[in-house]
Amino acid sequence: MGTVKFSDVDEWIDELHKDLPDRALVRLSYLFKPSRVSPNIRHLLLVGTHTVTRPGGEPHQLVRFEKYVGDLWGINPETDEKVRERGEQIMRKIESVCKDLKIEVRAGLIEGPE
């Protein structure tokens, strides 16, 4: 199974319109990755995944969206909240499009070969 990767939300949404996900299901979740600069800093990413069966019954293809949202420092709650709000805006945009396309959104990620 090959993986198609996107980092731009509008490109991923365009892909959803062109090739509907299997089972009309998208997985959408936050990932927290540690910073290499400081153990206190965490990078917040929004990740979405779905699979598509290619025409002619070809093997599934994993489609992955990964967007860096910002850094959470744990020092200033207002700054961290702005980062979270940025992630929520992107998530709401995706959920709205999925609702219009009658695609269910669930938490979690579909893993595939990197």
Image (spheres, rainbow, N blue to C red):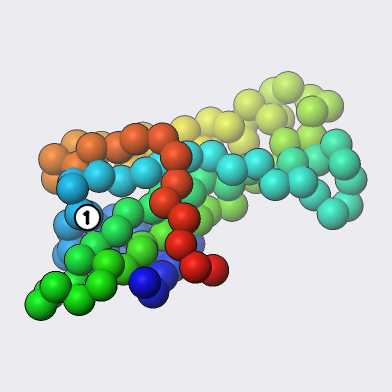
Q: Quadrant of residue 92?
A: top left
Pick the front one: 65 or 108: 108
Q: Position of residue 82 (x, y in %)?
A: 61, 31
Q: Which residue is mark 1?
A: 21
Please name the amino acid that badge 1 sits on.
Pro
In the displayed image of the protein, which residue is found farthest to the top?
77
Depth order, front residue of 48/71: 48
> Residue at point 14% right, 73% down?
57
Answer with the quarter of the image where residue 72 lies: top right
Residue drawn at point x = 29 percent, y = 59 percent = 51
Residue at 69%, 30% (x, y): give it. Answer: 80
Q: Quadrant of residue 54?
A: bottom left
42 relative to 35, above or below? above
Residue 27: image x %, image y %?
A: 37, 44
Q: Report the residue that reaches farthest toward the left.
A: 56
Q: Is residue 61 left or right of residue 87?
A: left
On the image, the x and y values in percent for residue 103 come to 19, 42
Left or right: 114, with 80 as reference point: left
| Whether residue 59 is situated above or below residue 27 in the rendered picture | below
Above/below status of 17 relative to 104:
below
Element marked by disc 1: loop
